[in-house]
């Protein structure tokens, strides 16, 4: 049965935004009390958060599909829909989030670090929020936006200060069991360790973590043995410890050639050249092991390695090794740059940035791409003529019609708004005014005017003239 999983593919879906409500207030003796449709609620986000109590991605291996809740639709009486609840997914410290192409989206290190994997859709505006002096009684509301749907890959890279590397059965698990309180599986056959083991070591005033990586063999960086699956766990470690077996039963192996083989695999994997190394000659409790350690030690020290002769079984040389590792860990921690306070970077848009693009494709279709026009299309109920007219007004004021003319579009040409797989396509008809404004005072009900005092009507008319000057009608959903 699988007990440790360090790589999973996760399918996450954020909640959809709730639709806005189109409603008119009704009360005794006030048959037309004005629009009172509430806004829809926001869809819930899917958030990955580092939790120190989680050490594996096993839960997501068994349940890879996760979805946040949708926002509730708005209601009459200016009642807003309830926001969807965020779905918080706990992940181990050291989890890397990638897209399907392998691009890194986030590197989650440190308790509480979080990343929004999928963002919930915005709630649609109700007709009360869309009302204005020119549009007193809108007969439509905006639809809620769909939430993000993404496929991501989670990879766990163990966060430890020291990594023990070496051939299978070199004694890494035995060493971590006597240096710390960890109790890994120990046996006398290769590849006993199938998952990285983590232990905590205290040496004087320094407390550090140590991990043993499952046995590496030549070709591990190309996928042989277990190496490719677990070499990633070495990446975050500050110190590398070569555990060399001085009592191996294989005649073609010796500590120096083992060291060279593992170093070659680390070199091919890449990114580890700057890590300090220590060499541990293990199993000196065996007579032949002690003799071999004495033979190879001068050669290893000539290469610049600090060499320690230890016996995990006999508890020999462990104190000196633990303090030496503590010294290197302390130096590595001191050399790390201090984390700076979060800075807010402001990137103003260029003065000529319209926020959208118009391109002509090979088949003669004109395609409009941009955050605003695509979002407005998603929020439009195309079964409501007034809502379609409102969309036309917004696109016209944004300058889409003007850009289509510049691009050479003519009456009857096809225009698509959005990506190829999910676009709204229509036959373009140029006009001086957008279709909704050709209807005149769209959304206005003259029966409402009769119920207002004359002074109020005058103020409304003045507001209409002011609004026409500053284009107040181009209201942006929040």
Image: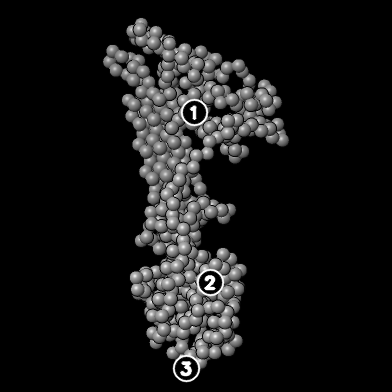
Position of 91 with respect to 413 (left or right) is left
Q: Tell me if I can see residue 194 in this picture.
A: no
Q: Which residue is mark 2?
A: 226
SS at badge 2 = loop
Determine the image quadrant of residue 358: top right
Label 3: few (<14), some (14–19) or many (≥20) C-alpha neighbours in 10 Å? few
Who is closer to the viewer here, 284 or 172?
284
Q: Which residue is mark 3?
A: 287
Position of 204 with respect to 230 (left or right) is left
Give how far apart the Cα atoms at labels 2 and 1 are: 55 Å
Residue in the picture at 44% in, 50% down = 115
> Quick check: 336 above or below 65?
below
Q: Tell me if I can see residue 455 in this picture.
A: yes
SS at badge 1 = loop
Who is closer to the viewer here, 425 or 215?
215
Q: Earlier in the sequence, mark 2 or mark 1?
A: 2
**Which mark identifies residue 381?**
1
């Amino acid at each position: 049965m699988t007990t440790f999983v360090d790589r999973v593919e996760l399918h996450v879906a954020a909640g959809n935004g709730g639709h806005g409500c189109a409603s008119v207030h009704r009360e005794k003796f006030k048959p037309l009390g004005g629009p009172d449709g509430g806004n829809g609620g926001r869809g819930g986000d899917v958030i990955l958060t580092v939790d120190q109590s989680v050490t594996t991605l096993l839960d997501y291996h068994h349940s890879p599909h996760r979805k946040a809740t949708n926002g509730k639709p708005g209601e009459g009486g200016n009642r807003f829909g309830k926001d969807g609840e965020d779905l918080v997914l706990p992940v181990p410290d050291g989890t890397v989030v990638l897209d399907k192409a392998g691009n890194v989206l986030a590197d989650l290190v440190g308790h509480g670090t979080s990343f929004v994997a999928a963002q919930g859709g915005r709630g649609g505006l109700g007709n009360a929020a869309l009302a204005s002096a020119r549009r007193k009684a809108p007969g439509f509301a905006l639809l809620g936006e769909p939430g993000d749907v993404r496929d991501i890959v989670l990879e766990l890279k163990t966060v430890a200060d020291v990594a023990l590397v070496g051939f299978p059965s070199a004694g890494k698990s035995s060493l971590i069991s006597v240096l710390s309180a960890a109790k890994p599986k120990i046996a006398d056959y290769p590849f006993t360790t199938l998952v990285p083991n983590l232990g905590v070591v205290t040496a004087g005033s320094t407390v550090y973590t140590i991990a043993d990586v499952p046995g590496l063999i030549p070709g591990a960086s190309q996928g042989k043995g277990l190496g490719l699956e677990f070499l990633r766990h070495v990446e975050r470690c500050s110190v590398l410890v070569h555990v060399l077996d001085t009592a191996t039963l294989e005649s073609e192996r010796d500590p120096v050639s083992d060291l060279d083989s593992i170093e070659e695999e680390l070199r091919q994997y890449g990114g580890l050249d700057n890590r300090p190394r220590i060499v541990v000659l293990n199993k000196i409790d065996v007579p032949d092991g002690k003799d071999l350690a004495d033979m190879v030690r001068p050669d290893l020290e000539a290469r610049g390695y600090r060499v320690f002769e230890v016996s995990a079984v006999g508890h020999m040389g462990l104190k000196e090794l633990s303090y030496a590792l503590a010294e290197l860990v302390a130096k590595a921690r001191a050399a790390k740059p201090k984390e700076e306070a979060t800075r807010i970077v402001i990137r103003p848009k260029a003065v000529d940035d319209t926020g959208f693009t118009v391109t002509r494709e090979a088949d003669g279709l004109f395609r409009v791409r941009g955050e605003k026009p695509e979002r407005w299309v998603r929020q439009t109920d195309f079964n409501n003529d007034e809502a379609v007219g409102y969309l036309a007004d917004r696109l016209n004021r944004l300058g889409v019609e003007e850009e289509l003319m510049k691009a050479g579009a003519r009456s009857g040409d096809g225009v698509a708004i959005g990506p190829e797989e999910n676009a709204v396509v229509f036959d373009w008809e140029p006009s001086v005014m957008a279709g909704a404004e050709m209807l005149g005072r769209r959304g206005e009900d003259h029966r409402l005017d009769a119920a207002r005092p004359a002074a109020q009507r005058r103020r409304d008319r003045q507001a209409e003239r002011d609004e026409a000057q500053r284009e107040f009608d181009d209201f942006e959903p929040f």
